[in-house]
Image (cartoon, rainbow, N blue to C red):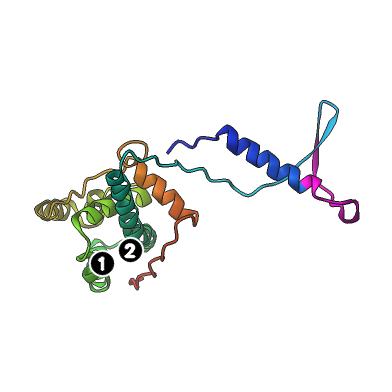
Amino acid sequence: MKLIITPILVVFIFLMISADIIGQTTDGRRALPATISNGDTLPTVNMGTVFVVEKKVFKSKSDKRKYDRLERYVTKVYPYAKLAGDLLQTYNDTLQTIKNEVKRKAYMKKVEEELKTQFEGELKKLTVMQGVILVKLIDRETGESSYELVKELRGSMSAFLWQSLARLFGQNLKLKYDPNGEDRDIENIVIMLENGIIPYAPRGSAQVTQ
């Protein structure tokens, strides 16, 4: 998502810095780091990161309701996408240590069973739209579509079968994430989640075989 620094924000930042400097009385002076530019000594103030997100303007109450629903859905499935990214890293690290192909397949089979035991009940409760958002966010977190992940970890035939099954339930594991296009609103919401602007409950780590 393209971040826009507005003139108002620039003025706001300047006022924050000015208040920080001017607000020090002679009784409570504070030394500041400085830089010299063209003979002038300029104080340097380190600020925390400023996150600028797009302000939504809604044409109708219906659009507002749709966006609010999208925000609820993204907040609901985002923890699973984050967990998927963490788990993928764990799987890859472990698989790097397993050279025998039979043992690799056995490991992935055991992992699959463990994940089904832990999450199948929860994920079955997702609506079709929540499932679509989750598939896209998994692509965002891992850099690969859900289809590509299944193909990589379980083989082309498994990926084909899972994709065929997903299609029966209105899903598409090949969906790619487009933060600058149709998924712009989702990206905006995720940025707010990542930076604590919108609160969410992180999903606890899965108990996965090492």
Neighbour class for label 2 at 10 Å: few (<14), some, many (≥20)?
few
- The reply to whether residue 148 is visible in this rendering is yes
Q: Is residue 132 left or right of residue 45?
A: left
Q: How far from the left and from the top, in percent, is residue 168?
A: 9, 54
Q: Say which residue appears at 19% left-offset and 65% top-offset.
A: 124
Judging by the rendered image, the residue that carries numbered circle 1 is 103
The residue type indicated by label 2 comes to Ile
Q: Nearer the viewer, residue 7 or 178?
A: 7
Callouts 2 and 1 close, C-beta under 8 Å: yes
| Mark found first going from the N terminus, 2 or 1 | 2
Q: How far from the left and from the top, in percent, is residue 16?
A: 69, 45
Q: Is residue 82 left or right of residue 136?
A: right
**Residue 81 belongs to the span the image colors magenta:** no
The image shows residue 75, relative to residue 118, as above or below, that is: above
Task: State the count of labels.
Answer: 2
Q: Nearer the viewer, residue 10 or 153?
A: 10
**Residue 29 belongs to the span the image colors magenta:** yes
Residue 154 occupies which quadrant of the picture?
Answer: bottom left
Q: How far from the left and from the top, in percent, is residue 80?
A: 33, 61
Q: Quadrant of the N terminus?
A: top left
Q: Say which residue appears at 59% left-offset and 38% top-offset.
A: 9
Q: Say which residue appears at 49% left-offset and 37% top-offset.
A: 3
Q: Which residues are magenta?
A: 21-35
Task: Please tell me whether mark 1 sits on a helix, a strand or a loop.
Answer: helix
Q: Say which residue appears at 31% left-offset and 61% top-offset.
A: 99
The residue type indicated by label 1 comes to Lys
Q: How far from the left and from the top, in percent, is residue 72?
A: 33, 57
Residue 45 occupies which quadrant of the picture?
Answer: top right
Task: Please tell me whether mark 2 sits on a helix, a strand or a loop.
Answer: loop
Judging by the rendered image, the residue that carries numbered circle 2 is 98
